[in-house]
Image (tube, rainbow, N blue to C red):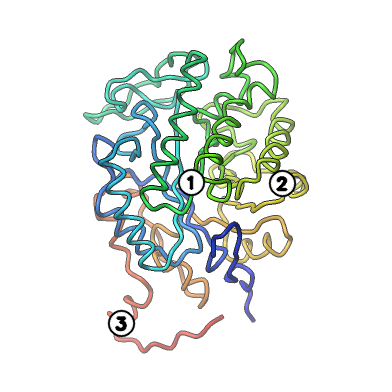
Amino acid sequence: MNTTAKLLAPLTKGGHHFRNRIAMAPMSRRRATGDAMPTDNMRIYYGQRASAGLIIVENTAVAPNGVGYQHNPGIFSAAQQKVWKQITDEVHQQGGTIFIQLVHTGRIGHPANQQGLPTVGASNVAAAGMVGIPGGNHVPLPVPDTLTTAGAAAMVQAHVDAAIAAMEAGFDGVEIHGAHGFLPAQFLHPATNQRTDKYGGSIVNRSRFLMEIMEGVAIAIGKEHTGLRLSPFSGLNDLPTYPEELATHQYLAEELDKLGILYIHLSDQSVNGQPPIPHAYLEDLRQRFHQLIILAGGYTPATAEARLQEGLADIIAFGRPFISNPDLVERIRYQLPLAPADPETFYQGGDRGLIDYPTYQIIKENCGLADDLQPA
């Protein structure tokens, strides 16, 4: 019996043909150089995983002061854009579809990781926690400089410019990172948004920064090439849940539906000890937003299929299973065991733990076993 019929079925939307409903979730692997330059092993890494219906590339900074963590890539220079073009060419040669997640980390960063530039945020409220900097040290997250009204508008434009650069680099679309406590989420949250200008106060005003990004990107590259990641109720990066959170996300869903972007991608962090996204919220979102919904957060093939069959999602994103299973789609198709990943190499290791995980077929050949794979 095929228990993943819908998960493995193709999907066409907005001019995109997804050959299955399995997305590779964006995951920071921190293999970029110190100046946020993507590297050739990233080309191999994403090319190996091109059988996913959709690859969403790791969060990639739209500006030098938005890098946040060491060795995260950027797309704010022509040199970076050139390397990304090699990566998208590789995925397309393998028949894949590839979006890039664009991020500004805001207060979750440090000048030492941002070419010496000041860390900025919606307001001058520091996040709890430490961040790694060059030299192997970990230091407290700094108090960010508050973006002026003009500075916030410039950050909106940085996202738009990065989206244009991404399309020129061959990406099929972009995903704006509005989740996980990064800059757009810092504008949404009343604890980190203490502003009195047009970007502060009411739900509408606190949503303005994100909505200006979404509108600007949709106009610049097309709404059918534009997605958004959100993480309602997640509590990540020192942003706890707040009384207006549900109303804020309901407002966003309705406005994004009017805008007609390709998808909303929800990140559920319950596998990491954070509150789950309530089932009732997913049902409500489906009524308010009528484009694609992508869900991520600890799914198995069986639970992914169940969500699709419920009609609460159109695509399911898998994260860590893709790290150690470049052929994850084939393993799901044939109900093959999944290889475990090495957490020690999630964020370091060069090629090790990035491009050296073998496919199941290679493992069989090395063991001298016959090719007897049959669809589930």
Quarter of the image that includes the N terminus: bottom right
Task: Say which amino acid is labelled 1.
Answer: Val
Q: Tell which of 198 and 339 is nearer to you.
A: 198
Determine which residue is flagged by label 2.
289
Against 170, residue 158 (above or below) is above
N-terminal of the pair, mark 2 or mark 1, is 1
Q: Circles 1 and 3: CB distance less than 8 Å?
A: no
Name the quarter where the C terminus is drawn: bottom right
Q: Are marks 2 and 1 in contact (CB under 8 Å)?
A: no
Image spot of residue 24 (x, y percent): 47, 56
User: Is 140 above or below relative to 68?
Assistant: above
Determine the residue positioned at 57% across, 50% down: 224
Tags 3 and 2 touching, CB below 8 Å: no
Residue for badge 3? 365
Residue lying furthest top = 196
Q: Residue at x 60, y 52 (%)?
A: 294
Q: Residue at x 48, y 46 (%)?
A: 174
The residue that label 1 is drawn on is: 174
Q: Amino acid at mark 3?
A: Glu
Q: CA distance from mark 1 to mark 3?
A: 38 Å
